[in-house]
Image (tube, rainbow, N blue to C red):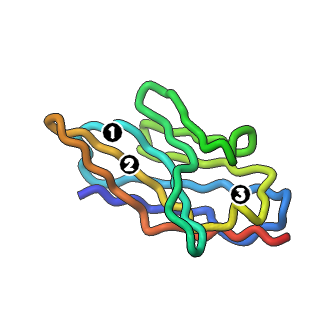
Amino acid sequence: QVQLVESGGGLVQAGGSLRLSCAASGFVFSIVAMGWYRQAPGKQRELVATTTTDGSTNYADAVKGRFTISRDKAKNTVYLQMNSLTPEDTAVYYCNLRERNRGRYSDYWGQGTQVTVAS
């Protein structure tokens, strides 16, 4: 069973920075991608950034140029460096891991970490 443990959330002033980490443990057949999603109060969960095994990345338009996703394959850990934070970035941030096993895809989620940006 795959477990994802997130860390790095907290309270920061607008314009500040935070770095989120997500470490995966347990047996994983083949990681297809790891990434970050977020959910603000009253809103649906949305993609923030993802990175695939070949190193390609994808960002939501709202965070392009401010957030950077990276991955340490040896540690099965994904990071999200968040700069120039705004109150609109306030949300619970969830780590995601997509696995492929015999042609089937499975998604695993972390418990979420709160990011609050004060104006």
Name the mark nearer the viewer: 3 or 2: 2
Q: Nearer the viewer, residue 65 or 95?
A: 65
| Residue 42 in which image quadrant | bottom right
Is residue 43 left or right of 111 when viewed as pictured? right
Question: Farthest left residue?
Answer: 102
Disc on res. 110: none
Residue at x 23%, y 58% (from the top left corner): 1
Amino acid type shown at disc 2: Leu
Question: Farthest top residue?
Answer: 54
Do the CB atoms of the residues marked 2 and 1 lie less than 8 Å apart? yes
Inter-mark Cα distance, 3 to 1:
25 Å
Amino acid type shown at disc 3: Leu
Residue at x 49%, y 37% (from the top left corner): 51
Identify the residue position indicated by label 2 in the image.
97
Residue 107 spot, x, y in % from top left: 31, 52
Residue 86 spot, x, y in % from top left: 79, 60
**Badge 3 or badge 1: first in the primary sequence:** 3
Is residue 86 left or right of 95 when viewed as pictured? right
Disc on res. 31: 1
Identify the residue position indicated by label 3 in the image.
18
Residue 110 spot, x, y in % from top left: 42, 62
| Residue 33 in which image quadrant | top left
| Residue 98 in which image quadrant | top left
Dot 3, how many residues are within 10 Å of its Cα: few (below 14), some (14-19), or many (20+)?
A: some
Q: Which secondary structure lies at badge 1?
A: strand
Q: Which secondary structure lies at badge 2?
A: strand
**Badge 2 or badge 1: first in the primary sequence:** 1
Inter-mark Cα distance, 3 to 2:
21 Å
11 relative to 5, above or below:
below
